[in-house]
Image (spheres, rainbow, N blue to C red):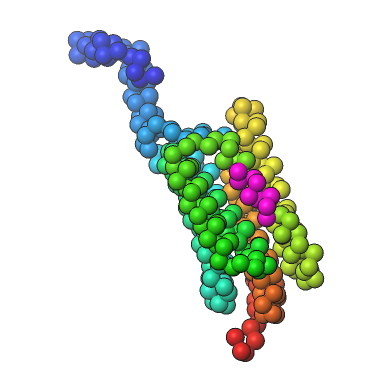
Amino acid sequence: MTGAISTVGLRSVSERFVNSEPSQQAIQVLSGILNCRMADTISSFWGPVTSPEWCEKNYVYSSYIAEFFNTISNIPCLILALIGLVNALRQRFEKRFSVLHISNMILAIGSMSYHATLQRVQQQGDETPMVWEMLLYIYILYSPDWHYRSTMPTFLFLYGAAFAVAHAIIRFGAGFKVHYAILCLLCIPRMYKYYIHTNDIHAKRLAKLYLTTISLGTVCWLFDRLYCRNISSWYFNPQGHALWHVLMGFNSYFANTFLMFCRAQQLEWNPRVVHFLGLFPYVKIQKPKSQ
């Protein structure tokens, strides 16, 4: 908009101010130019947008955050992953669970960076950890019954490295979403097997919460993506993508806690699901003295 106003036009307005008393119209013109330039400066703090945008207006609440709600909505995931990590370290769970919680934290930070900047590089920093995290879930779910222990982690590591390189070169677009959905679907049969072999009521409730949050989160994601034009005309934006972040933060925590319970059960660590303040679930174990 600012570029449409020529230098000649600016000079003519300036001359009016110098040679005569400024008219109301001239003041309005200069005020409009100043406001437009300020808006352009704010909206381009991180440079031109080079990644897909979501259904939230950019730079509304901060000149440093493009999508405010889509950015801060990752904070619950970060906090929940940190709580899970502390619990895993405090009770000396297997290192795979510590790595899993750390991967959740990396994903949350990557997502915050992406939505704050809307840059292509930061988008990769969000999407690549999403795939790595799912590969880690696949390892945790299937490794207990895998006969050749070294082959699975080696293959998954090489697969994750190859994807990171390919994703840095190629824009997958819809292909990334299909690929991520396939990885998620690979986890479901194994999660169901663990569910039917678990008798603990509280552990089953964790699995149900996992299913509920991922279902609601998917609905919010699709609603935000498919009906953005309609939502943009509403007085109030429900922030479907931000809700997806919040729900997936809880989803990851419920999934991790359920898997920690199942693994502790396999190792005969007498796991129990207890609740902090009567609400917040976590796994408490009692290892045999020999361990």
Of 247 and 68, the residue lying toward us = 247
Tell me the residue at 43%/33% (across/down). Answer: 49
Q: Residue at point 65% right, 86% down?
A: 288
The residue lying toward the viewer, choosing from 6 and 283, is 283
Residue occupying image coordinates x 76% and y 62% = 193
Residue 115 x, y percent position in the rendering: 48, 42
Viewer-proximal residue among 252 and 29: 252
In the rendered image, residue 284, in percent from the top left (x then y), is placed at 65, 76
Residue shown at 69%/70% (left/top)? 262
Image quarter of residue 96: bottom right
124 sits to left or right of 222: left
273 up-or-down from 36: above or below: below
Q: How many marks?
A: 0
Q: Eyeballing the image, is 62 above or below 184?
A: above
Give the extent of the magenta segment: 179-187
Residue 178 in picture, x, y percent from top left:
62, 40
Q: Is residue 192 visible?
A: yes
